Amino acid sequence: MGLTGDLKDFELNDIFQFIHMSGKDGVLHVHSDLGEGTIYFDRGNILHAEAGEHSGTDAISVLLTWDQGVFEFITGEKLDKVTIDLPVQSAILEAAKKIDERKKIEEVIPSIDAVVDFVAEPGLSEIELQPVEWKALSIINGEKTIKEISRELDLKPFQVIKILYDLAQSGLIKVVGEEK
């Protein structure tokens, strides 16, 4: 029998620390109404994590926001895939930074169902845009959702949200609504 519990009683970062301090090999399965996640450990170090479409420290940052659900650690399960090459503390800190970044971004762009459009009269100063930002701008029409823009750019939705957030911070675009 492995380690099992409820996220109401134990936070995931505490479970990560326990597994790390124990030097265990295995997989931590997390089940929640928000989804499912898996984190693989080798001698207590995190090697790989997945949560929905997220992997690596992105998955850790998603999982650390879950406060309801159950977990189970099964010893001995291995995986050759490595998406995290950081000590547990560093992976947790990296994930915490991403959580903070997501919260800041969500204040401007609430979801992938948001619709963005150009600002009518941007207060332009010199703005340097990356090629992917130019490409995103060429797709924006005031009707497409971020999800649709993401598909057209062939990028993950969060990558597009970050690009559009930067464009919104530059004063070029704004959220004009949300598709239901």
Image: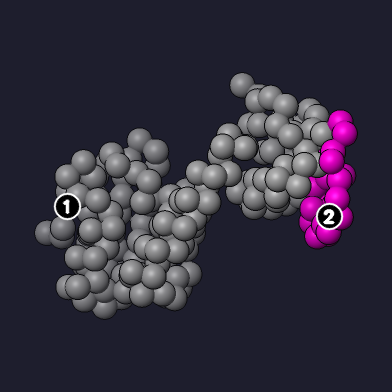
Question: Which residue is disc 2 drawn over?
Answer: 127
Question: Which residue is disc 1 drawn over?
Answer: 4
Q: Amino acid at mark 1?
A: Thr
User: Could you tell whether 52 is left or right of 168 in the image?
Assistant: left
Quadrant the C terminus occupies: top right
Category of crowding for the residue at label 1, using alpha-carbon neighbours closer than 10 angstroms: few (below 14), some (14–19), many (at least 20): some
Viewer-side residue, 160 vs 94: 94
* Residue 13 point in image, percent of width and height: 28, 58
Which residue is at 21% across, 41% downward? 8
Q: Which is nearer the N-term, disc 2 or disc 1?
A: 1
Viewer-side residue, 47 vs 58: 58
Rendered view: 107 above or below 21: above
Viewer-side residue, 48 vs 112: 112
* Residue 124 point in image, percent of width and height: 86, 45
Which residue is at 40% across, 42% downward? 35
Residue 11 in view: yes
Quadrant the N terminus occupies: bottom left
Q: CA distance from mark 2 to mark 1?
A: 52 Å
- Tag 2 and tag 1, C-beta contact below 8 Å: no
User: Could you tell whether 111 is left or right of 77 in the image?
Assistant: right
Which residue is at 39% across, 38% downward? 34
Rendered view: 144 above or below 31: above
Instruction: Please give the range of residues in magenta.
Output: 120-141
| Rendered image quadrant of residue 50 | bottom left
Q: Residue furthest top?
A: 180
Which residue is at 36% across, 75% downward? 87
User: Could you tell whether 142 is left or right of 28 in the image?
Assistant: right
Q: Is residue 129 magenta?
A: yes
